[in-house]
Amino acid sequence: MKVSPSLLSADFSNLSPDIEMINNSQADYLHLDVMDGVFVPNISFGFPIMKAVSKICTKPLDVHLMIVEPQNWITQVRDLGAEIMNVHQEACLHLHRTVQAIHDAGMKAGVTICPATPVNTLVDIIEDVDLVLIMSVNPGFGGQPFIKHSLKKVRELRELISSTGSKALIEVDGGVNLTTGKLLADAGADILVAGSYVFGNENPDDAINSLKNL
Ligand code: DX5
Ligand code: ZN
């Protein structure tokens, strides 16, 4: 299993030790949650913070934009050196164009769907994306309980990917812990995002390893 710890649950008053921990861990990515107070009812952090983080983080950055009009920020995300740029399907009027523009900028394109957005809305884009991020909570906050229906969506997405020959990876975000992580692994997830489970743990490194071993 690949693991993408979410910085949202790190100590914002002292980020360096948490990033150092991620650098020295078995984590595959660092997940960065950008919120604009419009697409989601919360504001997290923006480019100045991410720029500083990108300078000391040695893991590939997995940027999750919970913002309206994410197509306006492709250059800035590219300039962070991000590996994956995730945009919400619900925030993109011209999703195909945005996915192409992310690729043209040299990044992997991820499309994210909220809990109430059906997997079948991805039928006409699945072959063009590198990753689908299934939200297993309503985006905007860390520490929310896992929505069980997400397991069905992961299974449906796994079927859609096999039937189309798409190379997309399945990432899941929200309420991930050892129990829900095991269910997600069985349902076919490739990457688990975990915020509070990692940073709320007495030993974050063990928490990452426990998900890695699923
Ligand atoms: C929520 C964010 C998540 C968040 C997950 O909107 O997209 O990445 O950090 O937090 P946990 O793992 O605590 O549910
Ligand atoms: Zn996220």
Image (cartoon, helix red, strand yellow):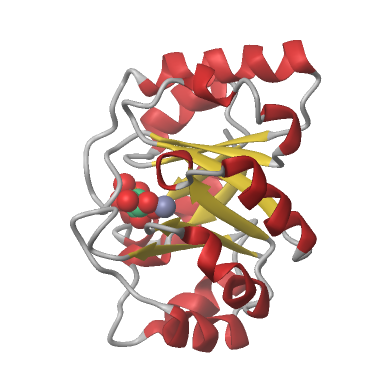
Q: From this viewpoint, which residue is outermost toward the left?
A: 41
**Eyeballing the image, is 3 above or below 30?**
above
Q: Position of residue 189 (x, y in %)?
A: 58, 29
**Eyeballing the image, is 76 above or below 165?**
below
**Eyeballing the image, is 154 above or below 40?**
above
Q: Position of residue 156 (x, y in %)?
A: 54, 13
Left or right of 116: which side holds 169? right
Q: Position of residue 140 (x, y in %)?
A: 26, 53
Left or right of 185: which side holds 105? right
Q: How many marks?
A: 0
Q: On the image, which quarter does residue 75 sit in? A: bottom right
**Eyeballing the image, is 184 above or below 58?**
above
Left or right of 184: which side holds 23? right
Front-most of residues 76 and 69: 69
Question: Which residue shows up at 47% across the image and 39% down it?
Answer: 89
Q: On the image, which quarter does residue 33 sit in? A: bottom left
Question: Which residue shows up at 43% across the image and 19% down it?
Answer: 151
Q: Position of residue 125 (x, y in %)?
A: 66, 30
Q: On the image, which quarter does residue 7 sit in? A: bottom left
Quadrant of the image containing the N terminus: top right
Front-most of residues 150 and 175: 150
Tell me if I can see residue 48 in this picture: yes
Front-most of residues 192 and 34: 34
Question: Which residue shows up at 36% across the image and 35% down it?
Answer: 114
Tell me if I can see residue 197 in this picture: no
Quadrant of the image containing the C terminus: top right
